[in-house]
Amino acid sequence: MSTPFPASWVRIPKPALVLLATLATVIPLYVLAVLGYQNPLSWLIAGPLVAVMVAMLLVRLPILGLWAVPITLIWYVYLPLLHYEFLVVLLALSLMLKDWPKLDWLRMRTQSVEFRYLLFLLATLPGVIGVVSLWRYFGAIKLLGIGLLGFVVARRAAQRFGTERMLWGPAIFALITSFVLLVRAASSDLPTFKQVIFRVPLSQLSWGSSNYVAAVLVLCLPALVLLIRQNPPRSWRRGAALGTLVAAVGAMFVTTSRGGIVLGAGYLVAQTLRPRRLTWRPLVVILLLVAATIATPHGQFLISRFTSPQGIASALARYWGWHAAFERGVGAMPFGVGAGQGRLQNDRLGWIDPHNYLLTLFSEHGILCLALWLWLFWTLYMVSRGDRSSAGARLAGDALRATLILAFLNLQFEPIMTGSHYHLLFWWLVGIYAGSLEPAAVAVLQRSGPRMNPAFRVATEA
């Protein structure tokens, strides 16, 4: 199999590599400590050395560059091209430059998923006719394009490095996010019964609100379960994955997000009840955990979010938003109001997000884009149900299918797919699973889309 990310592209003796790494680490720290991080001269000296250190790390451990994509999601700095998007573009360029001399442009064919994604992107372009703000329009198109690049890079990298190694990047992101929320809740001076009242300040991060953070953690649950299943029972990697899963569930409990907790709990209960020969012990443990959760102040507050007048009103407001978004889409047939233009409309919905991604696609991108996106989603679902002859293929297929189902349900009532974090992480995880299923899904892809590149078929079957 070809290796899109080679382990080493330059030969450096090990003693020299250790010396260079030490100098590239110690000198920047010393310069920043003496001159201060606000001094431009310190960054002029330390900057190139830091770049050399990062380059050497990527030469020896290229998986770190791939882990950096999901891990750097924990920071948010508003830029026209976000830092994790820039990393995806760099990885995609390196992949293209490596494969460029080997491409047979006359016989090259795209895969089924990529082909449908490209059709979807092309169908969004006519929406520029009704655009009011080009800045928002290009931002929405950029978000969709980065998703495609993330899928392609993650799929190829999963073939090179394997599913488990690739999934540790999203797992580390979920662990850091959960740790921040749990530490914030534990270190607050508020008693438990007041923490539920101030749940939004406690669980809101710089890159998302409490409901958004819970939705992102739910998206990571199938990856954590897959990591647990792939490792032996007594290995430290399995323990780390299990600890991350427990931390993620605890963090979702801190957010008290109705949709996140219901979807996360439903997925974990389904995984627990999945064995055919189910004994009474898992049922007793589940019932005890549910009873203990309901008895806590957080559990009582979560129930009140479903039964209180304020909770019922927020649910009814979503129905109103769905109806208004549908009216917007019908009034702007067939191309919609334009990508990213929903918040600029002067109709009944106004600047409010419809809290339903299908209606967002319909109202902003048009009926054709909605149909193509559903077609793309269905293709991924069929890939997840491909050849299940091996245990690895079954586990990866289950994780892909669970990710698709959880995301599809969540985006029906939360504005998550329009967020850069959720959108990129979704396609990154889907790309990892699809890359893991390549040998098993070749037949499905050939039946459901254009003919594959012969060189790629040979590489996947090797």
Image (cartoon, helix red, strand yellow):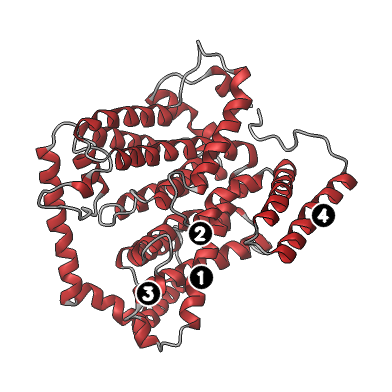
Q: Earlier in the sequence, mark 3 or mark 2?
A: 2
Q: Please tell me whether mark 1 sits on a helix, a strand or a loop.
A: helix
Q: Nearer the viewer, mark 3 or mark 4?
A: 4
- Which residue is tagged 4? 22
Expressed as whole percent of the image width and height from the top left, the position of residue 86 reads: 52, 42
Q: Amino acid at mark 1?
A: Val
- Residue sitting at 69 percent across and 46 percent down? 51
Q: Earlier in the sequence, mark 1 or mark 4?
A: 4
Does the residue at mark 2 contact the one at mark 1 (Cβ under 8 Å)? yes
Mark 2: which secondary structure?
Answer: helix
Task: Give amino acid for label 4.
Answer: Thr
Report which residue position mark 1 lands on.
180
Q: CA distance from mark 1 to mark 4?
A: 31 Å
Is residue 300 visible to the viewer in this orientation of the structure?
yes
The answer to whether mark 3 and mark 2 are in CB contact below 8 A is no
On-image quarter of the N terminus: top right
Circle 2 is placed at which residue position? 74
Alpha carbons under labels 3 and 2: distance apart: 17 Å
Q: Give the CA separation, mark 2 to mark 1.
A: 10 Å
| Residue topped by disc 3 | 201
